[in-house]
Amino acid sequence: MYLRSFLSAAVVAASVSCAWAGDISGAGATFPFPIYAKWADAYKKATGNGLNYQSIGSGAGIKQIKAKTVTFGATDAPLKAKDLEESGLEQWPMVMGGIVPVVNLDGVKSGDLTIDGPTLAKIFMGKITKWNDPAIKALNAKATLPDLAIAVIHRADGSGTTFNFTNYLSKVSPDWNSAIGEATSVEWPVGIGAKGNDGVANNVAGTKGAIGYVEYAYAKQNHLTYADMLNKAGKAVAPTMEAFQAAAANADWAKSPGFYVILTDQSGDQSWPLTAATFILMYKKPADVTASNEALKFFEYCYDKGGDMAKSLDYIPMPDNVVALVKKVWTTDIQQK
Amino acid sequence: MTASAIQATESSGSLPRDRSGALGRLKVWDAGFRFMTFGAASLVLFLLLGVAISLFIGALPAFRHFGLDFFISDSWSPPKERFGAAAAIYGTLATSIIAMLIGVPVGLGIAVFLTELCPPALRRPIGIAIELLAGIPSIIYGIWGVYYFKPFIMQPYVQPFIIGTLGAIPGIGALFAGPPLGYGILTAGLVLAVMILPFVTAISRDVFETVPSVLKEAAYGVGATTFEVVGNIVLPYTRVGVVGGVMLALGRALGETMAVTFVIGNATRISTSILSQGTTISAMIANQFADADPGLFTSSLLALGFILFIITFVVLALARWMLARLEVKAER
């Protein structure tokens, strides 16, 4: 009895003193969780250091890093430069993804339907209620659109996907901007709220006449019908890796303090208008420098070796020029000794 | 303890001193025991008070900022920082009322059948099935609701039927109008009805079994039908227990979170039709708390929690009051 408790105490003491102070700890956005998990797995195999990432949502991630309970926070909705300065945080984009409008219409396949931003805003505001509305017909001369009610499906839980989606609608529709605005959860005038990307995907798949928005990976895995979009340049684009990357390449990262760039509605003929980046938050003067350095090593590994892993999960790696900018910021701004 | 004390008094000569020592020890033990049970009981009071106070403190900024509007407005817009609880309060009450309207009569019916009419061979299997239903976690009901009940029962059959019949009646038709999307207040209410059924049944059955058979036999002896026996003997005899079971069920219906979130459609608005989407207090908190910004948003969610606390409290107080009135009536 005594021996056993003594032994277990010794084991605990040994494990604390030998290993580096545990895993890298982070919390936040759910959107990049699959790729962070994959990177962490590969990193653990390569170095022996693990990552403890809690995907509790962007807002909660910001709360956690501000409370200093984690080494890094992760958020889909970037903090503004002023907020970063006040809290002493550094922010950079880690990886990108695409959001696609998905529909469920008999006889309509992926690519058959094209929607532009203002029309999308009107659908999600309940101002366009039928699929054969003149506004949709005008964009799709060839498609046969039924006299069917549109069932709007949106996220019920707060999410970075919703933030980027509503940010786009706010940019392209003044009505949306004044009545609803952009946030991780908004007051939807119409529609059904479903939990998570998978909830939206399931509901669109199960409801005739439905339209929703999900991350590209979910649309692909669930074989949902996606719609093409008219971008800022007025060109019709399909959601592809190239289109997402084009949006990132057109963004002006260097001149944006705190890398505050929201990738929706970027210019460029090839740009997919619903592209989104997800961000990391860390302290410039970390309380635990060792933990902070370990986290930076992990992120460096992700940038250098994680590109193909990201692509395999339908995420888009950051362009090289952006990665170079981020690494420069690490050395100049974050205290590493 | 007592046995050893007696043994001690028998074996030794100095009798009075030993007895007082033993009695003293017993007294201390008893006082300690009393203190511990008192502590356990008062802990509940402190916890209740603590939860209420901490919720209220968290909710205070929202109450201060919005005032009475918080209870009247059904607008819930985080980016515009406009928060109103009306839609969530309405959804919570509406789903619970639907659940009670269906769950209570059916639950009582099952209990009467089990205790008065059921062939003995069936009694055990049905009783066990009811208890199993009570033990199913609510998330399972939610999954059942969203993957089976909604797409295969509500959407293709129940909702079109209701829209075609009740929805066509002028006047009250607006209550049952709308496209059959499957999700909504009614679907949530029906799933809740299934969830509270075992509570009503299990408790009612247990109290029905306490009715002395002489009372029932006497009633049957003077020619009463089963219906009359249940209405005039069993229910009056067991009303306290039955009301208790119903209140426990209502408590579950008011606070149920996951199952409701799955099927209610999560729309923060009040619609006239019970087929349209809505939300409840607990569903709102579950959906939005993780991503809520500190400040008014979080405070408003805490305020919702405080309101649910008050609603539950009022319901329980009403139940006590009803019971007290029943007692007075019965004594006259």
Image (cartoon, coloured by chain):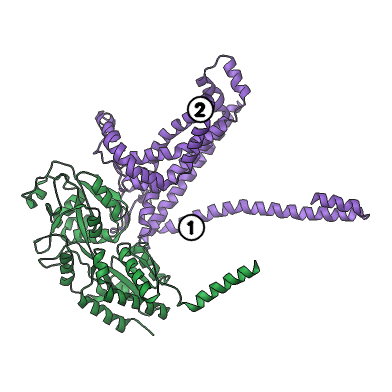
Chain colours: A green, B purple
Report the mark closest to the observer, 1 or 2: 2
Q: Is residue B109 left or right of residue A154?
A: right
Give percent across and percent down for residue B9.
89, 52
Q: Which residue is mark 1?
A: B54
Q: Is residue B289 left or right of residue A132?
A: right
Tag 1's secondary structure?
A: helix
Give percent across and percent down for residue B2.
81, 49
Indicate which disc residue B112 carries. Answer: 2
Q: Determine whether A182 is above or below B167 in the image.
A: below
Disc 2: host chain: B
Question: What residue appears at the point 15 percent right and 66 percent down from the top-left corner?
Answer: A242
The total number of labels drawn is 2
Amino acid of disc 2: Val
Q: Are discs 1 and 2 less than 8 Å apart at CB?
A: no
Of the pair B300 and A331, the residue shown nearer to us: A331
Q: Determine whether A68 is above or below B33 in the image.
A: below
Work out whether residue A154 can be spotted. Answer: no
Q: Determine whether B245 is above or below A125 in the image.
A: above
Q: Residues within 10 Å of mark 1 (few under 14, many from 20)?
A: few
